[in-house]
Image (cartoon, coloured by chain):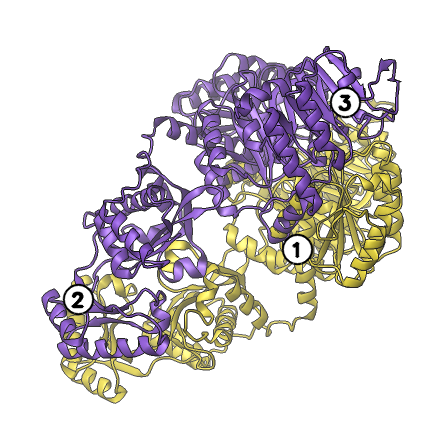
Chain colours: A yellow, B purple
Amino acid sequence: MEKSLDLKTLFHPRSVALIGVSTEQTKLSGRPFRFFREFGYTGSVYPVNPKYQEIAGVPCYANLSDIPGDVDLAVITLPASAVPGTLAECGAKGVRAAAIISSGFAEVGGEGVHLQEELKRVASEYGIALCGPNCSGFIYFPERVTATFSVGLDGGFPELGPAAFISQSGALSSYILGAAKERALGFRYWITTGNECVLSFTDYLKYLLEDPEVRLVLGYLEDARDGQAFQIAARRALLLDKPLIIMKVGRSEAGAKASVSHTGSLAGADEVYQAVFSQNGILRAESLDELFDLAVMSQASRRPRGNRVQILTNSGAAGILLADVGSEWGLEFSDLSSATKEALKKIMPPFATIANPMDLTAEIVARPGLLKGAAELILADPNVDNLVIFLGIMPGAHEKLATDIAHVARATDKLIMVTWFPLPLPEVRQILIQADVPLFPEPARGIRALGKMAQYVATREKALARQPPPARKEPDSGSEVGKILARAKNQGRNALTEVEAKSLLNACGLAVPRGGLARNAAEARSLANAIGGPVAMKASSPDLLHKTEAGIIRLALKSAEEVERAFEEIVEKAREWNPEARLDGVLVEEMIGGETREVIVGARQDLRFGPIVTFGLGGIFVEAIRDFAVWPAPLTLEEARDMIRKIRGYRILTAFRGRPAADVEALAQVICQVGQLACQWQEQIAELEINPLFVLPEGAGVIVGDALVALR
Amino acid sequence: MEKSLDLKTLFHPRSVALIGVSTEQTKLSGRPFRFFREFGYTGSVYPVNPKYQEIAGVPCYANLSDIPGDVDLAVITLPASAVPGTLAECGAKGVRAAAIISSGFAEVGGEGVHLQEELKRVASEYGIALCGPNCSGFIYFPERVTATFSVGLDGGFPELGPAAFISQSGALSSYILGAAKERALGFRYWITTGNECVLSFTDYLKYLLEDPEVRLVLGYLEDARDGQAFQIAARRALLLDKPLIIMKVGRSEAGAKASVSHTGSLAGADEVYQAVFSQNGILRAESLDELFDLAVMSQASRRPRGNRVQILTNSGAAGILLADVGSEWGLEFSDLSSATKEALKKIMPPFATIANPMDLTAEIVARPGLLKGAAELILADPNVDNLVIFLGIMPGAHEKLATDIAHVARATDKLIMVTWFPLPLPEVRQILIQADVPLFPEPARGIRALGKMAQYVATREKALARQPPPARKEPDSGSEVGKILARAKNQGRNALTEVEAKSLLNACGLAVPRGGLARNAAEARSLANAIGGPVAMKASSPDLLHKTEAGIIRLALKSAEEVERAFEEIVEKAREWNPEARLDGVLVEEMIGGETREVIVGARQDLRFGPIVTFGLGGIFVEAIRDFAVWPAPLTLEEARDMIRKIRGYRILTAFRGRPAADVEALAQVICQVGQLACQWQEQIAELEINPLFVLPEGAGVIVGDALVALR
């Protein structure tokens, strides 16, 4: 089914049937009719309800089949039990789109689940684009398609704008719609997804991105059910430079619990979501304020060109606050060039300091050309990417200052934004808004939005420049990896042994320690002999995966006696720990010593987003302080390098306290390889972990210390 | 000089002279006169300026001495150079308080510095309470004392309230004043401190806290110059339960730089400020929005009783957002008791889930008694400390819902707060405000304020319950510690040797490794012999403090040969590293092995706040990931325990991966002892660091591995 085709009818219906309509205009079932009439929808509107002959002068039909003309869209507000049958009637009449506002489906469990399955079947049978059920409907503003009962329209029909909003919430979406005018945000689409029986959050997103008039998409998201499609759509948004601003909730335990009870979706592990968001430049809003702030920043046609910011203020304190918060969000407050400083000296009051932030003091009012002159000089400086202005209460000067800023903004390609506290009158705000200058009511909020936007731009530039990660290889059952996996599977096992896991990784080009499997003490001794230096020994068994706990590891064994004794002890411990365990023998390997760092590299298959790679420092670091990074696979070498740099303990891998730097480049390659493995063998490998991976000094590579591969 | 006496005259003058007054009412020098007249100050107002005979019908005096009556307060707006002389005239006439608005003093450097010194001298000579210079003056609202030119009064005289505001900024303070009305915040005092030539931020704070009508104090702070007095005042505020809400800026490099150029004060190390704030329950505002949010929360007469919160919402999504953000700020969203759940079932719609957050859905409007009934049941539940309500747009129901909440609030002692998005009309807000229900325009902001307030309450309870830390002991020069310090001082040294530092700590009861100083290889061998196990050896020299870098440490030496060889090598390395270094010998000590953890405990004298204790995990943890905690000394055992629990890597000290728990209690005691040492010997010890301190398993104590004491 080509869903995208149906969405066109959903948003551009030439005629609408309101099935289950009520005459009570305050009721959920009465409000859509009122909105269609009141706000000037130009298509045909057919109320359907056997109880009435007409509503507000419009003929009302007892049944859908009584409607004389074609119907494109059905808005259904009937009780749940009546909905599947009605949808089938719609299908029979050729209705190709429906918004089912009624609740009582999957979200209530039991019979509701069956009703929803029936809906899905009917929609599929007739190819109906279905919004909901259990939703607040949708609005397509340009054509006044108001398939909703939302109280967000109670304040009147809002102004059009370049934003689209997709939401997995009902009530809150209405409040966001209601608040948009005050925040100078205009919508083109407003969609509540409800139970997503047919159309999902991602389906809408894909469609909206291709509307050239949509310049940014806002979302309220509890769970992206089709994670991989979501990732592709998010990447598309990034390439099109249509910022995706999402409030993703359900991060806390309490929040996630509520999320389950709310719309029946399971909140995802927040770390994976965050990685997917970061990878695709999705702007995450942590509050309703921030949702609007990021939208205001995104709807400006100008983007930050970099992260260097000059602050112009009429309050030193506000300047410091801006610098403090901006620094936290990655902005830089660099020095102006000396030429700019010289030029500024000529127009600045003698007591003012030419600095960053730069405080124009009360002179900003006393000298009418000061702000304009300073702003122009600053914007001409190549050291400046963005100009942030703070203003406060300046009696009599607001309009003049706003006009000056608008003038300067029109003459530059660089981003100028204003934070004005408290906000001036609406007519003054309008001057800035019309000049495409983002305006914020609070300095910390404004500069944070700029910081996130600069990050978005950087992510986008990286995405445009980057080599795509190597395409997913088809699993090749004839390869060494394929054979190892198949053998274990055939034996009914759900994990590889350490020896197998290392062979698998070695077949992919990863270095493993020299050594082999000893079946008796004598073999162990001769293996140790051949290795030459101190050795490590561990029991090898498909049934003993947690070797430290079982006490079946011995390290740094030097003499032949030590090796033989260790063999006997390991076998004994293994038997004690699990008498049923199959024991293949004891692995005898060279000790990896010297200036190595231990790290962990792993991959697992995420339910939503597919293969996810994890990297962290080894041992207590990862476990005790949860110092690790996750990223979706496949990933590029540059992304792997970013993962490594991102962890708190990164310095430990650099030249530090007299130790040489670790071979971070070889580590990055392994992270990529592990990601590729997880992608290629997605159907076979459930989880893969190298722990520890020994990272040798720069140029010397890495060696797999131990590895675990769990099968699906 | 008893500053607090003079403050009374400053804020309650019976007469005011406005020296340098202008007839131009828009000018800085004309505005105070206008405000005094316009807003109904009832004392005498004397304009002083030789240029005029009268201003607006009021006689104007050429000189201060021409004024017939007494003058309590002088508001001076003359050019800087004329101010010291004028202040002396004030003194001669018996004026006891002054607000010097003029700038051109220390903040401009050069001659300005001298002018300010002169001001200080004159103020001290005549005992004048001096606000400023280089400030926006102050306001005492109840008596309409408007010694300011602030544009914050341009919107009219604000409503009175229980808040006081002290600010090291001028312009921003005016904007905060101007924004207060919209945010339902009322002030009693509004003070800008300027250059703090005489009266400091802390002086005002101390005074305000003793006004019984002041219930909360807001501050904008760049630097607390008298840090120890500030700490005492903050502690007093906490005990009086008058929340201190401070925006402390200058945290970033760019911000701190601006801070210096702004009012001539050096921004403090942010970590120390944060520790002082945490210790004293100071609520830190990270933005202007948060300054107001915390004020709204603080001015309510009710405090959170604990951190358990039930959420009632009419939007599931808003409920999840509240739970997410609340969890981040330490709130708990616990289960209601089963009795409450049973009772709720009887009034809730059948499809609603009784959970936390609890979504009342659109039924909140459809069932008029639902919100009230549910709120009452929840508040009666002993599992609930606080009730947080979220509301949105509910046509026709706002007044009824607000009235219901107000009713419920009046019948309970528990805290109820409301987040309403978008905000309802002012008359609806008023219903809640009058019922002492804090109201917030955005859910994330509201719940964050609650989280911080619950933390404030917990800090206050701890402060009330805690044993005061042991009083600072006077330094006793006859004690062992005194002797060690004196000897080094007398030898002109600025640091103790390791041997001395360990003796000093040992004299305070801390365990040190067994061992001694060897002057030759034979002595080393016999010391090692006496110790019995493997030993550690290090050069002992007052000139070689960084032993690892110098390569003068050898560890785990077992045989007599190893010990003798190590002696020779250490001596040789020491000579190589610094041929001039005095070498006392080589320290031979038992190796501390087994299940120990290495930590660092240190103390230093902070310029502002005095002795500060630092604790962190040893080695790479502290250096590579900056995982440490700081706290002002002296500190209680409970505070030391909190420091330990606060670091990210705390789990490493607990029973973890089969290792026994470390002796955290003994560690806490050492942290206290180090704090006490730094307090007692504040004049002698500049810095003290135990690194590493070996923490043995529970019950086995701690041992000083190495120690460094730098002298003042």
Position of residue A187 in the picture relative to residue B609 (left or right) = right
- Which of pointers 2 and 3 indicates the residue nearer the eye? 3
Q: Secondary structure at mark 3?
A: strand
- Closest to the camera, between mark 1 and mark 3, is 3
Quarter of the picture containing the C terminus of chain A is bottom left
- Same-subunit check for callouts 2 and 1: yes
| Rendered location of residue A321, percent (x, y) | 65, 44
Tag 3: residue type? Leu
Residue at (68% x, 12% y) in the render: B14
- How far is mark 2 from mark 3, CA to CA? 92 Å
Q: Is residue A548 visible?
A: yes
In the image: residue B196, left or right of residue A428 = left
Give the structural element (helix, strand or loop) at label 2: helix
Whole-angstrom CA distance, mark 2 to mark 1, is 57 Å
Q: What amino acid is found at the position of numbered circle 1 in the picture?
A: Leu
Q: Is residue B690 placed above or below B460 in the rendered structure?
A: below
- The picture places residue A444, in percent across and down from the top left corner, at 66, 43
Q: Are marks 1 and 3 on the same chain?
A: no
For disc 2, the marked residue is A573
Tell me if label 2 and label 1 are in contact, CB under 8 Å. Answer: no
Q: Choose top left, top right, bottom left or bottom right for residue A247.
A: top right
Relative placement, left or right, of B621 versus A558 is right
Residue at image mark 1: A331
Quick one: label 1, few (<14), some, or many (20+) residues within 10 Å? Answer: many
Q: Compute the Cα span from label 1 to label 3.
A: 45 Å
Dot label at residue B18: 3
- Kind of residue indicated by mark 2: Lys
Label 2 neighbourhood size at 10 Å, few (<14), some (14-19), many (20+)?
A: some
User: Mark 2 touching mark 3, by CB under 8 A?
Assistant: no
